[in-house]
Amino acid sequence: MNTTIEMPLWAALLAILLAALWLLQHLLLPSVRWFFRRRANTVIEEVNTRLALKIPSFKLTRREVLIDRLCYHPDVMAMVDNIAAQKQVTREVLITEVREYAQEIVPAFNALLYFKSAYWFARKLVHSIYRVRLGSAEDDELCQLDENTSVVFLMNHRSNMDYIVATYLAAERTALSYAVGEWARVWPLQQLIRSMGGYFVRRDSGDPLYRRVLEAYVQMAAQGGVPQAVFPEGRLTRDGKLGKAKMGLLGYIAKGFDPQGERDIVFIPVGINYDRVLEDRSLLRAAEQKPRRSKLSTFSVFFAFTWKNISQAIMGKRYRNGYACVNFGKPVFLKQWLAQNTNNPAAKLTDVSELATDLMHRIGEITPILPVALVATVVTAKPSHAFSELELKATVFDLLEKLERAGYRAYIPRGDRDYAVTVGIRMLTLRHVMKSHDGLLTMNKNDIQLLQYYANSISHLVTNAESIA
């Protein structure tokens, strides 16, 4: 006798769904994870053969493990105990906050994404916007660093493009980890930055517990040998000048350093400059404390900028945005610096100001000198003067000679000074910052602050050169 078992349609669909989920969890997802893990390991082995600084094991540790280590870091636990005693708050509540902070800060480095997708994207993007040039680099000294060295790249902060340009130019040397402000905590940018090794920072947070968690992570990364990129100025320059160092991340790294330990910290000064900073007008508005543009106005400016570039490309008249140049300076070994500049080189640093000042000076010394900055320096010195092209070039040549006699190196496109000044003039006239009339070049009086912004990028070098002369 045949027995027929009937079941409701919803039950059959539920059974099929549960079976599909079981297959997905126990068969498909592990296979996919194994495939990508194998690809990532292959990429790591391949890039480690050519990188000047190999990827440290700390950077490859599972994110959940790093979060647990950070949550129970001795300094963090000491802070939790102090706050619990002072504010009569339970440790469980504070530890929950610590875990939230740790999950926000700790990155999830993905070698496959960093060296394949991110590098490809960075290369395409920067070359579509700028003519990117590496001015100078001390690669031989980087290759000679041993495994007990933590490298920190310290760079001036001129544009949000700094992150992308630095990632692109440093990709042949190492995989950088860098701090990013809260502006980038939007989907999917947040996930992308975290996968590239970036970590997020609440720059204006006054919460001592958060600051201690951040400090502990930065010190853990330094002790783990993670190459880090730090902007000592803390924010984008508003007036174009090189700012003073803040004691944030740099202070955490230096104060956590043990001079008697095996590991040394090496600071690499990095100077970066652009013929055009994409956010220049917005930064000047911020410097003058003017209200931010509305979203409609921002969209209109972006649309006009995009359309202008597309139309110029179609007509074959697009010159991109000039040159972006990066100089890597001579490494500064912290143990050696302490021996030369402190009375007790075996003691931990408590005051980082002298170190920070010295490092910022080194960054300033290698700031790239570009065509627009040279032309802007000459024009702003005589704001009411009408220059012939020949006179302007001759004056820029004189300025270049002063800078070179002082030991500063300018990036000269094609090695041709005449062409370099032509590039600077062309960039400024295309933007209508300078006007050409009857063969004479004059400054657009409405854009004097913009010209000064670019002149300020090398003003410290010009001042030094004139004092030497």
Image (cartoon, rainbow, N blue to C red):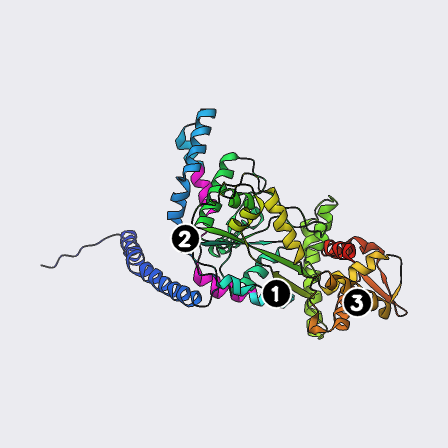
Distance between the Cα atoms at labels 3 and 2? 50 Å
Disc 1 target residue: 136
Asked if residue 114 lies in the magenta stretch, the reply is: yes
- Residue at image position (49%, 61%) is 174
Q: Position of residue 145 (x, y in %)?
A: 47, 59
| SS for callout 1 | strand
Drawn side of residue 254 relative to residue 469, left or right:
left
Tag 2 near tag 1, CB within 8 Å: no
- Residue at image position (12%, 59%) is 2
Provide the major secondary structure of the magenta segment.
Answer: helix
- Residue placed most toward the observer, 395 or 149: 149
Q: Is residue 220 visible?
A: yes
| SS for callout 2 | helix
- Residue at image position (86%, 56%) is 383
Q: Position of residue 447 (x, y in %)?
A: 80, 55
Disc 3 target residue: 397
The boundaries of the magenta stretch are 98-122
| SS for callout 3 | helix
- Give the number of the disc on residue 58: 2
Q: Kindly identify the amino acid type of the residue bearing the numbered disc 3.
A: Phe
Q: Image quarter for residue 71?
A: top left
Q: Of callouts 3 and 2, which one flags the residue occurring earlier in the amino acid sequence?
A: 2
Q: Is residue 329 above or below residue 124?
A: above
Camera-nearest label, 2 or 1 = 1
Q: Position of residue 385 (x, y in %)?
A: 89, 60
Q: How many marks?
A: 3
Q: Of callouts 3 and 1, which one flags the residue occurring earlier in the amino acid sequence?
A: 1
Q: Is residue 352 above or below residue 386?
A: above
Tag 3 near tag 1, CB within 8 Å: no
Q: Position of residue 362 (x, y in %)?
A: 63, 54
Q: Of callouts 2 and 1, which one flags the residue occurring earlier in the amino acid sequence?
A: 2
